[in-house]
Structures are given as structure tokens and as C-alpha cells.
Image: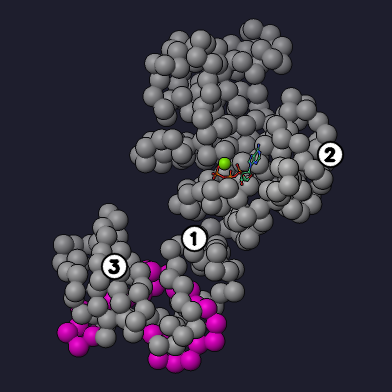
């Protein structure tokens, strides 16, 4: 039973379609991530659901009610944007209380709910500060608090972490997930970062050029991409055309094959048919660029010790598990 659903949604700007015929449903309490490259229509879809952008046709249902024609205020939906857009002349507390003032909630209840929500985002000791006295991560938490305080039926988050550095980003996304689970909030989260999508979501909806390409949990998107786009976008798959795959595997291959960089083993061997062209250190992983039979492959190896790092030019033998090969459309 879906709590929110988008049925046959169409949206165009002037002569160009952003999306045609989008269908999406989200269950109550579910955390769904919209993942896709820049310009694929993620923000537009979120804005249509929030009521900030009008749709051309199709319908949006929330808790069994058709909300397509409702104003943003009537929908009971909270939205957090990529840029925090706090009111600069209001304190943290006043920013967080804004939505409740609009709803004419009395001052006693307002104070209590704002105190609760600031505690939830760990900003209770910052209540009296102004936005210019906050870090980016703190500002983003105020923006989150400002949405949560109104107890939205649906929370929409549009790349709320993209302006933050990697460490704060990780911390804040764990915090968002914990709060979402604690409150049982139905959430639609937008990102173009695959790691963020894979770690946060109950379900990932992969979009490309205004269409939904694949929908499923992290494991199924990662291990079973439905097409070459999905394979290229998630997991850094190596994509091989039929001719390259045949040369590399020494047996005929009919279609395009995808193989993940961590599914290829690599053993130094002076007689080996492959050669390391270059490498980059990703921290816990070493990503090699390897040439074999005229094919260039990405190979990921765990960086356990300094001895795991082979010099560029080293001759190697590749170990490819046939079970790790996937045919893609
Ligand atoms: N107000 C507008 N007028 C005309 N075209 C627009 C408008 N807003 C968005 N678009 C176009 O619609 C398409 C989808 O934009 P959208 O902002 O939804 O992408 P996105 O997936 O959120 O991308 P990003 O990851 O860069 O934020 C883009 O091609 C964009 O140029
Ligand atoms: Mg966007």
C-alpha cells in the first residue's frame, strides 16, 4: 500500500519535456532515494511533489488523497533544499519556529516543539545564534529542523549535503537516517552521489534523462544493473563490447558485458598477458588501470599493506570469475 504515489506525471518547460510518464510510489516510513546525473529531472520531480512547480498532467496522491491541485501549504510536506536559505536576521530558534508561526501554533507549544527539534538535530546550545555564526553543517541542520518541526507527512530532501565536506557529510547523513527512523518519516531524498544512495536508502530509484531506469534496494542495484547506463552509474563497472569481451575471455561473447572492478583479481606474473598502466589510491582501495588483450580495465584491490601496491608497468595475470560477468542491454 503506497503512502505517496506519482502517477503518469508529465512536465515540460516550453518545448522541452523534463519527464514524460513518471510513476513512483513510496510506502509509509520508507526512505527512498532518487539517484541520477545532473539535469535528469530529480529536483523538478521533488518540486512537483511539493507543489512548488505545476505539473502538465498526471496525479500525485498522498495518504489516499489527490493533492495535485493543492497549494504547497495545504500538502503538509516538508522540503529541505541544497542551499540552506535560512533567514539571516533570525536566530536559530526563530528560524526553526518559522513554520509553526505560519501555522499559528501558540507560543507555549511553539517553544516546546522548537526545543525538541533542536535537541534532535543536536543544536540546542545554538538556539540564540544567527546564521552567519554557524558552520555549513550547522546551517543545514537548522534547515532540517525547520522542516521537521512542522511534522511533515512527507519529507523531501534535495541534495541537502552536497555543500558540505566529506566527514560532516557522512556524519550528517547518519543523523538524518537515524532521525528519519526514529520518527518513522516517509522520506524522498535526492542525490547524484552513489555512495550516499547506497548507504542511506531502503530503496533507490535510478533516473536518467527524465525516466526511471531501475528501482530496488542497494544490493540489487549494485549487483544487477539493468542496462549499460545503470552499470556505468553505479559501481564503476567495466563495460566491454562483444569483441573486447571475446578477446579478453578467450571465448565467444554475444552482447555487451559488465564486470565490477573488485571482481577482477590481479597477480604479478612476469609471463602474464596483462600490464598495469597506472593506478590511483582511493584510500582503502587501490584502483589500477590494466591493459589486457587490447582492453583497458579498472581493477580494484584492497589496500592492506604497502606491498599491495604494484608499480606501473608491472606484468600481471588477471583472474576473472565468470560468475561476476553480467550481460547488459
Ligand atoms: N525553470 C526551468 N525552466 C526551464 N528548464 C528548466 C527549469 N528548471 C529545470 N529545467 C530543466 O529541466 C531539466 C531537469 O532539471 P532538474 O533541476 O530537475 O535536474 P536535476 O536532476 O535536479 O539536476 P542536478 O543534479 O544538477 O540538480 C534540466 O534540463 C533543466 O535545465
Ligand atoms: Mg537538482
Q: Is mark 3 within 8 Å of ligand 1?
A: no
**Residue at 59% in and 74% down:** 329
Q: Would you say residue 268 sits in the magenta stretch? A: yes
The reply, left or right, for residue 148 in relation to residue 59 is left
Which residue matches tag 3?
288
Label 2 vs 1, first from the N-terminus: 2
Mark 1 or mark 3: name the one nearer the start of the chain.
1
Q: Residue 249 at x, y = what percent?
A: 40, 87
Q: Nearer the viewer, residue 28 or 24?
A: 24
Query: Measured from the top left, where is residue 71 in percent x and y?
Result: 78, 28
The answer to which of marks 3 and 2 sits earlier in the sequence is 2
Which residue is rendered at x = 43% and y = 83% of the image?
A: 244
* Outermost residue toward the front in this view: 15
Q: Residue furthest bottom?
A: 251
Crowdedness near tag 3: few (<14), some (14–19) or many (≥20) residues, C-alpha within 10 Å:
many
Disc 1 target residue: 234
Q: Secondary structure at mark 2?
A: strand
| Residue 184 in view of the camera | no
Say if disc 1 is inside 8 Å of ligand 1.
no
Q: Where 254 falls versus 125 (above or below)?
A: below
Residue picked out by circle 2: 66
Of 320 and 107, nearer the camera is: 320
User: What residue is drawn where x is 54% and y is 16%?
Assistant: 87
Image height of 290 relative to 230, above or below: below
Amino acid at each position: 500500500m503506497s503512502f505517496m504515489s506519482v502517477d503518469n506525471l508529465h512536465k515540460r518547460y516550453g518545448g522541452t519535456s523534463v519527464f514524460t510518464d513518471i510513476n513512483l510510489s513510496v510506502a509509509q516510513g520508507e526512505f527512498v532515494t532518487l539517484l541520477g546525473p545532473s539535469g535528469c529531472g530529480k529536483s523538478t520531480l521533488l518540486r512537483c511533489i511539493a507543489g512548488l512547480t505545476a505539473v502538465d498532467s498526471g496525479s500525485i496522491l498522498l495518504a489516499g488523497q489527490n493533492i495535485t491541485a493543492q497549494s504547497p501549504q495545504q500538502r503538509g510536506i516538508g522540503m529541505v533544499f541544497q542551499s540552506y536559505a535560512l533567514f539571516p536576521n533570525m536566530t536559530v530558534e526563530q528560524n526553526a519556529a518559522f513554520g509553526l508561526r505560519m501555522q499559528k501554533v501558540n507560543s507555549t507549544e511553539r517553544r516546546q516543539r522548537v526545543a525538541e527539534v533542536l535537541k534532535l538535530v543536536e543544536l540546542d546550545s545554538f538556539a540564540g545564534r544567527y546564521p552567519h555564526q554557524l558552520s555549513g553543517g550547522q546551517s543545514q541542520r537548522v534547515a532540517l529542523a525547520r522542516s521537521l518541526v512542522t511534522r511533515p507527512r512527507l519529507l523531501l530532501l534535495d541534495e541537502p549535503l552536497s555543500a558540505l565536506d566529506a566527514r560532516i557529510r557522512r556524519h550528517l547523513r547518519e543523523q538524518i537516517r537515524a532521525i528519519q527512523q526514529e520518527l518513522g518519516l516517509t522520506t524522498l531524498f535526492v542525490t547524484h552521489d552513489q555512495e550516499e544512495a547506497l548507504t542511506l536508502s531502503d530503496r533507490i530509484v535510478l533516473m536518467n534523462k527524465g525516466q526511471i531506469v531501475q528501482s530496488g534496494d542497494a544490493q540489487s542495484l549494485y549487483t544487477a544493473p539493468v542496462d549499460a547506463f545503470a552499470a556505468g552509474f553505479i559501481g564503476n563497472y567495466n563495460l566491454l563490447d562483444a569483441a573486447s569481451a571475446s578477446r579478453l575471455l578467450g571465448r565467444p561473447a554475444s552482447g555487451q558485458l559488465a564486470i565490477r572492478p573488485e571482481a577482477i583479481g590481479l597477480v604479478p606474473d612476469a609471463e602474464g598477458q596483462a600490464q598495469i598502466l597506472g593506478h590511483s589510491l582511493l584510500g582503502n582501495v587501490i584502483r589500477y588501470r590494466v591493459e589486457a588483450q587490447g582492453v583497458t580495465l579498472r581493477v580494484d584491490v584492497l589496500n592492506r599493506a604497502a606491498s599491495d601496491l604494484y608499480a606501473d608497468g608491472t606484468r600481471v595475470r588477471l583472474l576473472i570469475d565468470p560468475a561476476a560477468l553480467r550481460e547488459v542491454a
